[in-house]
Image (cartoon, rainbow, N blue to C red):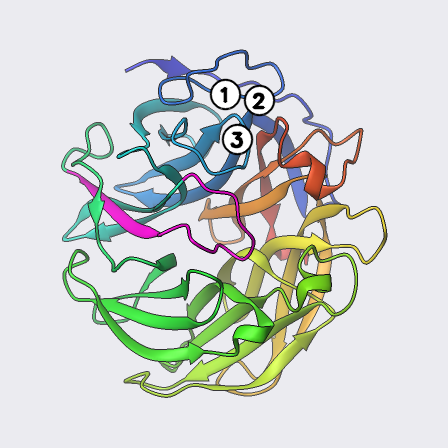
Amino acid sequence: MRSWLLLGLCAACGGGDWLTDTHIIVDGYHADASDCRTAICPHNENTDLTVFDGATYLVHRTAMSQILGPNSSLRISRSDDHGRTWNLLAVLPAIDGRDLRDPCFYQIGGRLALKALTRLPVTSTRDSDVDTIAVGAVSPDGGQTWSPLAPIGPEMWSYWRIRDDAAGVHYSAAYEDGDRSVALFSSVDGTAWSRGAQIYGRAEDTPLETELVFVPSGKLLALVRIDGNDQELLGNVGRLRTKVCWAAPPFSSWDCSRELDGVRLDGPVAFFHGSRLFVVARKHLIEPEGRKRTALYELTGDLDGGDLAIVEHGELPSAGDTSYAGVAPIDRDRVLVTWYSSQIGPDDAWARAIFGASDIWQATIDLSHL
């Protein structure tokens, strides 16, 4: 299929000696296409990365804006040189007149697989009345071709990232339409999923995207994004909080008595470097302007079911509508990271930037410098 060599547009940008080679790899600001089911459109977002069969894979959403709509698609690319060049493999258009977003990679029986969300093209708060259906597809040939997107979950549940335990069982934390609760789903074969225990169920906290992390002991950590009350939804006034929930196998009950105060981890991706646990997520600024950033955090404390604290190491080049990162290893100390961002110069409010153009960014993080 078509090859695309994406040149860095801001190679000198960075957040310190731990962050290098920051540049744009998908340019939304100069995109003039309007058929987002086949071409790159102005608004690009929702990235994920994985390593499969020795290569690095990238997926992202393209559309005219962040608003729900069927004029959207997921674009899947492969790199054989840790992100220096990318080759476009496939484009998966939205199906059934529904929106398509929030992809993540996983594997089924040694084959590359993809999870995404489809929703009705409605405008609402708290993901209400969107009739979410989590869908999946499998590639038999390393991402060149894909099975049709098909439901892998019940209606009204949005799967976040899929994680595997030591036995290869798949798990995902899913949030209910209306952002009312978060529950654990699991699957042995990656296609037939069953609902398990509720992770967090205080609807007044507006719980949604929940990142799962298996710690070395086999316990499961859930980092629950909570958007709070009506005044706090945009993340620029009031409380910023992330719930810390723990469960031991078989994950039938959860302890959510702990919380990270002063930080709300939107669209998080967590990863270990040795015994250290890092998270890339959207950063909120408490201010009237309503600006956002993408930042690198580290969770410290008892990573075996106890109290946690969070440290911010710094920001990635970002502004406006931003975050939803992907991470893939390069070597022992370095990882490739992707994220999306509106144009940095204007530094628009998130609530305005979601209607405009955004780019996909890439950088290298050297964790030995942290």
Residue sitting at 74 percent across and 32 percent down?
344
- When the figure is inspected, residue 58 is found, relative to residue 134, above or below; the finding is above
Residue 147 is inside the magenta segment: no
Task: Give the structural element (helix, strand or loop) at label 1.
Answer: loop
Q: Where is residue 35 in the image (x, y as percent from the top left)?
A: 41, 16
Task: Please state the horizontal and vertical placement of residue 185, each as a whole percent of the image.
Answer: 29, 69
Q: Residues within 10 Å of mark 1 (few under 14, many from 20)?
A: many
Give the amino acid type for the residue marked by disc 2 in the picture: Gly
Q: Which residue is label 3 attached to?
A: 44
State the residue at coordinates (35%, 52%).
131
Up the image or down, 231 lies above or below 75; here it is: below
Q: Is mark 3 on a helix, strand or loop?
A: strand
In the figure, is residue 113 to the left or right of 141?
right
User: Contact (CB < 8 A) between labels 1 and 2?
Assistant: yes
Give the alpha-carbon distance from disc 2 to disc 3, as whole Å. 6 Å
Locate residue 41, reporting x and y percent. 50, 20
* Residue lying at 68% horizontally and 35% vertically, measured from the top left: 353
Q: Mark 2 points at which residue?
A: 28
Q: Name the residue under label 1.
A: 41
Which sits earlier in the primary sequence, circle 2 or circle 3? 2
Residue 335 seen anywhere in this rendered image of the structure: no
Dot 2 and dot 3 residues touching (CB under 8 Å): yes
What range of the chain is rendered magenta?
Answer: 121-139
Task: Evaluate if marks 3 and 1 touch, with contact meaning CB atoms under 8 Å apart.
Answer: yes
The 10 Å Cα crowd at callout 3, few under 14, some 14 to 19, many 20 or more, is many
